[in-house]
Amino acid sequence: MILKKGNHKWLILYFVIYLPGIAQGQFKSVEMGIDGLTCSMCSRSVEMSLVKLDFIDRIEMDLNSNRSEIFFREGMYVSIDKVAQAVIDAGFSVAYLNALFDFKEQPIDTHTCWNYAYETYHFLEVSQPQLKGETVLKFIGTNFLSRTELKKWEAQLSAAKNKGCGQNEYYSVTL
């Protein structure tokens, strides 16, 4: 196939934008605690809200422990915000959100800013020098933790704002 003049610029741009996301790894699944689940209809409501997201492969709800495990389609962009928002839209709140990410070797330290798939992640309280393989990222923020748990992170979140990632919006995560 011969590319027309000017089309190779788009091809190069595609590789510059798309390949870094592939090379860094991807989200595999999320374990999420859900506050307010009291019956099977509550559980079903959350499940039906989540299943609308095209990047979700399957969902396992556990009413006994008020948690769910969500598995993602391979190679698709995953929006953690949309996962949390689907629970909120169903009328419940997120108690915790832990995402399994498959890293391909990522140097890391406390206050490291990491970009993946158009989003920025700011690491808090990290003791590992490098992430490789499947690693659980614990999301910290108002949509990802209960109020009680969020209060425990107030000092670290305040300090993180001063360090910043050079972005107005980013996810705060820890291991």
Image (cartoon, helix red, strand yellow):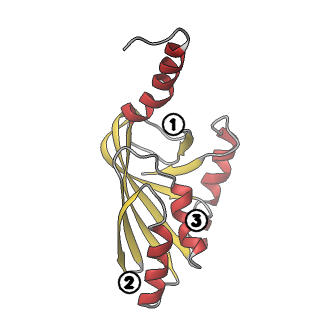
| Residue type of the residue flagged with mark 3 | Gln
Residue drawn at x 42%, y 28% as measured from the top left: 19
Q: Quadrant of residue 88?
A: bottom right
- In the visual, does 21 lie left or right of 6? left
Amino acid residing under circle 1: Trp
Residue 32, given in percent of the width and then of the height, sits at: 43, 68
Mark 3 Cα shell of 10 Å, populated few (<14), some (14-19), many (≥20): some
Question: What residue did someone put label 2 on?
Answer: 63
Q: CA distance from mark 1 to mark 2?
A: 34 Å
Tell me the number on the disc at residue 139: none
Q: Residues within 10 Å of mark 2 (few under 14, many from 20)?
A: some
Residue 59 visible: yes
Nearer-N-terminus badge (1/3): 3
Discs 2, 3 touching: Cβ within 8 Å: no
Classify 163 as above or below 8: below
Q: Quadrant of the N terminus?
A: top left
Nearest-to-viewer mark from 2 and 3: 3
Q: Residue at x 56, y 38 (%)?
A: 118
Q: Secondary structure at mark 3?
A: helix
Front in this rendered view, residue 54 or 159:
54
Mark 1 or mark 2, earlier in chain:
2
- Which is nearer the N-term, disc 2 or disc 3? 2
Where does label 3 land, which residue? 85
User: Which residue carries the number 1 mark?
Assistant: 114
Image coordinates of residue 22 in percent, x first then y, are 38, 34
User: Circle 1 sits in a helix, a strand or a loop, which is it?
Assistant: strand
Q: Nearer the viewer, mark 1 or mark 2?
A: 2
Q: Specify the farthest residue to the top.
A: 5
